[in-house]
Image (cartoon, rainbow, N blue to C red):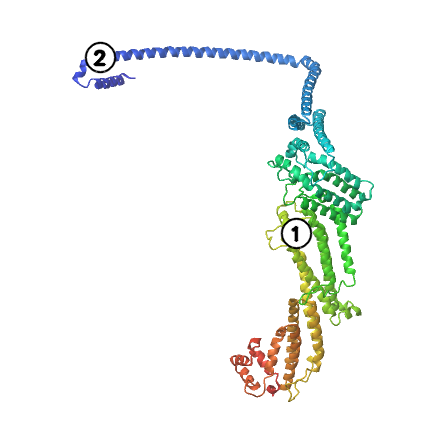
Amino acid sequence: MTTMEHDIRLEDYLDDKLQSTTDFDHLDTLLSSVEHQRSQLQSQLDDATAALAQARQSESDRQNALMAQIDEFQSLQSSIDVRLQIIASSDAPDEAIKRLEAPMGQLRKVDLAYKYLLLLQDVAKLRQEARSHLPESPKQALEPYTKLKQLCLRLKELQNNADGAAVHLVNFVEGVTETLWDEMKATMSAELEAVLKARKWPNVDPDNAEVDEEWLGCFEKLIDLQVPEVLYSPTVVTLLPFEVMAQIFVKEFRFHFMSDKPTSAPQAIGAHCFPWFTALLEKWEDFLRDNFGGVLAARFAETGVRERMVYMDPVCGFITAMLPVVREKVRDTLEATRGDAAFLSSLMGQLMSFDETLRGGFAYDGGDDDVEEGWGGLTSEVLQDHFRTWLEAEKQFALERYQGIMKTQDARMIDYDFAGAGKTKPTFAAVRVTDLLKSVTTQYERVRRFSHKLRFLIDIQLTILDEYHDHLRGTLEAYLSITSTVGRAFGVTKEQIAALEGTGALETLCKVYGSADHVVNALKDWSNEEFFITMWEQLQSRAKVTEDQSNLAGGMSYDHVRNRTSAVVGTEDNDNGVLFDETIAAYSARRQTAQKLLSEALASSHHKIFRAYLHRAQWTTISDEVDNLAITAELDEPLRILKRDLDFLSRALGTAAFRRVWRQALEKLNDILWTEVLMSHKFTASGAAQFARDLAAIEGVVERYIPDGSNALGSLSDAVRLLNLPLEGEGMTLKKATDMVYTDNTEAKKMLEEVGVADGGLTAANARQILGRRVENAE
């Protein structure tokens, strides 16, 4: 601080303390205070100076000590480097290590053996402790057994982490654990067996017998022993008390069905084995539920297995205990009948019925949590190994039956008794083919696995449908080859031509139409059945989530399944698709083709049979008789054939199809008569009247079979009405009509309205042409 700054601060201090003359009276006090403050500041300054000196001395000492340590470290490092050089150039350490390896290895082995012995000692203690609680207290026996089980699982886990070490130890502990569990079950089971033997089981009355306390107590002990196993086992556990109670029935089963008795024959399994089993369940059903249902409910009702009937229902528990011997019998039967496809087919049906009896009659679920799918049954177990054999057998049988159907004498005949009047009639073959397909459905509709059901549908049912479709298509192709000019050029036999004479051509086409229509209707009906709806939904769900498009189901690719079933498989268009889309489309195309050919066949026939009538040159005759005219002689044969064709088709086709076919044919007949009669000839009044009479005869034949069917001849009918205008009279005459039609279009339309044919489609130009056909106008 400079002297000037010090003077300024002093001046400011004095100005602050001596602001008036009275402040000088306290000058001594002020000086004393200033002196005291100076003394304090000096003391603080001395203390700070001493502390700074001490800190500097300490820092110097630390610096010296650090340098000494650095020197010592460097000296030590130099010494270590020297020693390392000496050691590196010497063989003594390696030799020492080699000499110590064997003793150290033995020491480790001794230590490991000691730990093994301690572990085995613990295992023996746990086993002995568990044994000591049996048979009086199975719950207490479970405590040491549980510890032993946990130890076994822990050893396995450690073994996996150690690349499979200590194999013998792990196997020994696992063996002890399993043996102990078997001993525990055997000990407890023996107690129940003794109780059952004392009560002469099963020689008791199932309707009146009651289980006493000792029996029930043994039952409860066995259940208590198994509770942990039931709760934590990934597979279904057979309840020990039912296993003990079922032993006598298993022996009886083996005696009857797995010995040299006649009832042991493989072919008797459905007639004797399965009925015996269900009869046994029906006999003891009420006894088991009444006496043991409460025990199972008390143990498992509040656990995670409460939804599994094999643990909640005594009858289902008893079935679980009996099924192994039935399963063994089924395996033996399959082995004994290997290669017998007919028996395999029969056995599968019997197995599915047996499974359905257990599921439906006794609510057996096999311990399966899947409510929708449920227990697959013995059938699913068999199909895991024998599905392909069964499928091929069923396919062979179905195809043989199909071939047999097609070879019968009446296969290609129309079944007129199939439906009533107004319904399309299929052939006998079509009816039998659909019946065959229904029977195939019954063979696999109870199969649980979706891929198996889809295989049956595609490999058997759709294959048969494809073959029958090819037959119908071949029939149409053969018809076209016979009737077409190109086809005849390649040679047609007289027999083939004769087969189409009369109603032969119509019958051939009606067979195709009726058969295709029958199949289409059957497939549409099946598509609305619950079974096929469910299959369609399952197929759609699987197609949307399956990543492997090469194996959508049963080894079939997505494209293969889609091409055989429906193009909307795997899309969001669920509501517009069914399993039979592609097949329905194919048969509908054959039906449409047959209908078109029917109309063409009728039109071709009409052109032939009306040929003589079309060339009749007597429309200009003059006669006074115009009221009671007879039908033109040349029309007799056409009318007869029309009646014949109408009669045949009315019996073979449904009403809607019958009307469609004839409408198209009559419209073409209308064009023929219009062009080749009306527009090709001149008419006198009597000639026009004759033409009107002939047309009325045609319409009359048509109306007998098709109400309002003559409307297809409406334009010709209106034209003939206009053609028959009288020469004179009070109403519309020929001359008046002619004058109006040639005046202008307005007058022409007015004339048509007065005649009553304005709504028939006739134009003014038509009217001029028609009126111009009258001889009187030509003159």
Q: Which of the image's four quarters has the C terminus?
A: bottom right
Circle 1 packing at 10 Å, graded few (<14), some (14-19), many (20+), is few
- The residue at the far front in this view is 208
Whether residue 230 sits left or right of residue 754 in the image: it is right
Q: On the image, which quarter does residue 248 sit in?
A: top right
Q: Quick one: 64 or 119, which is closer to the camera?
A: 119
Percent coordinates x, y for residue 354 in the rendering: 72, 46
Is 258 left, or right, of 516 in this rendering?
right
Give the amino acid type for the residue marked by disc 1 in the picture.
Answer: Phe
Pick whichever of labels 2 and 1 is earlier in the sequence: 2
Up the image or down, 443 lies above or below 128; here it is below
Return the residue at label 1: 531
- The amino acid beneath tag 2 is Thr
**Foreground residue among 738 and 419:** 419
Residue 684 shows in this picture: no
Mark 1 residue element? helix
Label for residue 137?
Answer: none
Q: Which mark's residue is nearer the viewer, 2 or 1?
A: 1
On the picture, is 42 further left or further right than 309? left
Question: Dividing the picture into quarters, in which one does residue 240 lie?
Answer: top right
Residue 676 sits in quarter: bottom right
Q: Position of residue 643 (x, y in %)?
A: 70, 74
Image quadrant holding the N terminus, namely: top left
Q: Is residue 648 visible?
A: yes
Mark 2 residue element:
helix
Count numbered badges in the picture. 2
Q: Nearer the viewer, residue 71 or 605?
A: 605
Residue, x 75% and y 44% (percent of image)?
A: 276
Q: Is residue 674 above or below residue 509?
A: below
In the picture of the structure, the residue carrying the numbered disc 2 is 29
Q: Position of residue 294 (x, y in %)?
A: 63, 37
